[in-house]
Image (cartoon, helix red, strand yellow):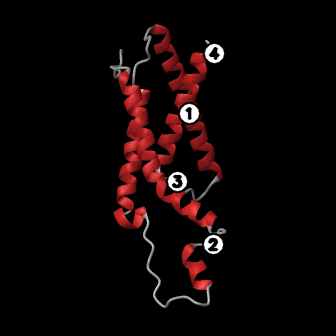
Amino acid sequence: MKLQILPNWCKKLGLTVFIVFSFIAAGDDFVNGFCDGYNSFQPIDEKIANKEHVVSQIEHITTFKDFFGAKTLRYLDALSILGILMYMLSKEKVEDDYINQLRLESYQLTAIVGILISIVLYAFSEEIKLTIDYFVTLFMYFYLITFFIKKRIY
């Protein structure tokens, strides 16, 4: 069976979509972490509250999550996953049977390793609290790394 693959220019588009939406979704944590580090690892509200000459009203500092909501962040994460999926399904510059064989081998190895990791996590952790997006992104990253290494080795 021949899988219809996206054209090569979709690699660049998928990578751009992935990077943009990943940085937007993770930017909230990055900015807050940077500000906390700049303020000596003390949250801004606590640092202001510890001062003796504090004004009685402290303006609430909003974050991206507060402004747009957690649901929007989940949509942005889903769009970044779709971007990396678009990258995965795009053709190489030279697409032949050898590349198709490497894709198949990489997919098989990734599926086997993913299933083994899931079984080990399930066996040793009684209360695992991971959502499906962790497994999907781990699967895609591992596939891309495996495909890249196999393409360079052979």
- Left/right of residue 1 with respect to residue 112 in the rendered view: left
**Label 2 sits on residue:** 42
Q: Residue at image x 52%, y 29%? A: 144
Q: Is residue 19 above or below residue 40?
A: above
Q: Is residue 89 above or below residue 131?
A: above
Choose top left, top right, bottom left or bottom right for residue 10: top left
Q: Earlier in the sequence, mark 4 or mark 3?
A: 3
Q: Position of residue 141 (x, y in %)?
A: 53, 35
**Label 4 sits on residue:** 153
Q: Residue at image x 59%, y 49%? A: 122
Q: Which numbered mark, 1 or 2, is in the foreground of this view? A: 2
- Left/right of residue 50 with respect to residue 10 in the rendered view: right
Q: Which numbered mark, 1 or 3, is in the foreground of this view? A: 1
- Left/right of residue 34 with respect to residue 75 in the rendered view: right
**Label 3 sits on residue:** 130
Q: Earlier in the sequence, mark 4 or mark 1?
A: 1
What is the distance, in whole Å, between disc 1 and disc 3 at their CAs?
Answer: 18 Å
**Label 1 sits on residue:** 142
What is the distance, in whole Å, between disc 1 and disc 2 at their CAs?
Answer: 36 Å
Choose top left, top right, bottom left or bottom right for residue 19: top left
What is the distance, in whole Å, between disc 2 and disc 4 at their CAs?
Answer: 48 Å
Q: Earlier in the sequence, mark 2 or mark 3?
A: 2
Q: Amino acid at mark 3?
A: Leu
Q: Is residue 54 above or below residue 111?
A: below
Query: How many neighbours does mark 2 have within 10 angstroms: few (below 14), some (14-19), or many (20 or more)?
Result: few
Q: Position of residue 45 (x, y in %)?
A: 54, 78
What is the distance, in whole Å, between disc 4 and disc 3 at their CAs?
Answer: 34 Å
Q: Earlier in the sequence, mark 2 or mark 4?
A: 2
Q: Callout 2: helix, strand or loop?
A: loop
